[in-house]
Image (tube, rainbow, N blue to C red):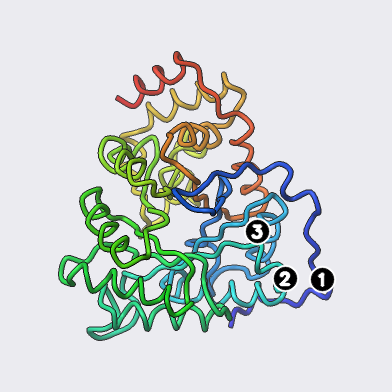
Amino acid sequence: MNINDKSNPTPYVPTPQRYQEMQYNRCGNSGVLLPKISLGLWHNFGFYDSFENARNILKKAFDLGITHLDLANNYGPPYGSAEENFGRILKKDFANYRDELFIASKAGYDMWPGPYGNHGSKKYLVASLDQSLQRMGLDYVDVFYHHRPDTETPLEETMAALDLMVRQGKTLYIGLSNYSHEETLNAHKILKDLGTPCLIHQSKYSMFERSREKTLFPTLLNEKIGSIVFSPLAQGMLTDKYIDGIPANSRAGKDKTYLQTDTVTQNLEKIKQLHELAVSRGQKLSQMAIAWILTQPAITSVLVGASSPEQLQENIKATENTLFSEEELAKIDQILS
């Protein structure tokens, strides 16, 4: 249990205006509407983080109309701790609002020792979702993803396991994450034949990671599958954090992170030019980067992380200006090329 957990006797009451500002998109060929901005709980929600800060981020998100919360079995650290903390927050603050939330979990990466704690077997996926539901105190999740393709397990077995979970009532919808366009097509065909079509696909996408545009995104549009993307700020590079160098307390300034100093240095000139363009639009670079993603026809929602309620609110302001002139789009392409 997190030592930073402190009881707050004041019950949380969300603002009645929470749905007035957020914009929602239909997710693929379904009845589901997702907010343009969704909240990912990959970082800042584990046992090593402040429990009260996590609570405050989630409350701010809901007050701003964010209904979609994205988790996975191994989010933390340690593994499972983000789901466990979320379950405690759900019980404390959101018990009366469960039906207003669209909660996701995933499985596919390393979770527990031995041959059944990883990849895409029915054994692993069924056990993992059962554990996730127990950690969060839920009867079901709204969408459950296979977190990554597994070439060692027959695709038919993995998709049959996902279909089984829907039929068991443990998840309402199925998603795929990090699948290529060919893998997505093959999996989607199997799922449709089973009677449980794929609702949504999740992948990495940003101004600095555009490989999905020519293959995957057209496939999702053609097959009427929703699309949600993560790392929209390229691990923080698409912010004003690195304009004047690499701060010691930044992600790139620390050891053993997903962002290396060399990566920032190689992209610094592009970052500075994009920053100047964002300023001319009256936005922060982070806001322009998110707004630019929302111009993609295939995109249903953008997953953002947050280290504080203030940072989350700042990123959501991206939705206030998502219109780009042809000149601006051409300038962005020129900078990125």
Amino acid identity at mark 3: Ile
Q: Is mark 1 on a helix, strand or loop?
A: loop
Q: Mark 3 points at which residue?
A: 57
Q: Which residue lies furthest to the left in this view?
A: 152
**Rendered location of residue 36, percent (x, y):** 56, 44
The residue under label 2 is 93
Q: Which numbered disc flags the more N-terminal residue, 3 or 1?
A: 1
- Residue 244 seen by the camera: no
Nearer-the-camera pick, 281 or 124: 124
Residue 193: % across, % down: 28, 63
User: Compared to 109, does 130 lie above or below?
Assistant: below
| Residue at x 84%, y 71% (from the top left corner) | 10
N-terminal-most mark, 2 or 3? 3
Q: What element carries label 3?
A: helix
- What amino acid is found at the position of numbered circle 2 in the picture? Asp
Count neighbours of disc 1 (C-alpha within 10 A) and say few if under 14, some if 14 to 19, many if 20 or more: few
Disc nearest the viewer among 3 and 1: 1
Residue 327: x %, y % from top left: 45, 13
Q: Name the residue under label 1.
A: 11
User: Residue, x 16% and y 65% (percent of image)?
Assistant: 151
The answer to whether the residue labelled 3 contacts the one labelled 1, judged by CB atoms less than 8 Å apart, is no
Badge 2 marks a residue whose secondary structure is helix
Q: Residue at image x 36%, y 81%?
A: 126
Q: Do the residues labelled 1 and 2 touch (CB within 8 Å)?
A: yes
Give whichever of 87, 190 is nearer the camera. Answer: 190
Residue type at mark 1 is Pro
x then y, percent, for residue 291: 52, 33
Determine crowd level at label 3: few under 14, some 14-19, many 20+ residues with C-alpha closer than 10 A.
many
Sequence-wise, the earlier of marks 1 and 2 is 1
Residue 94 appears in the rendering: yes
**Disc nearest the viewer among 2 and 3:** 2
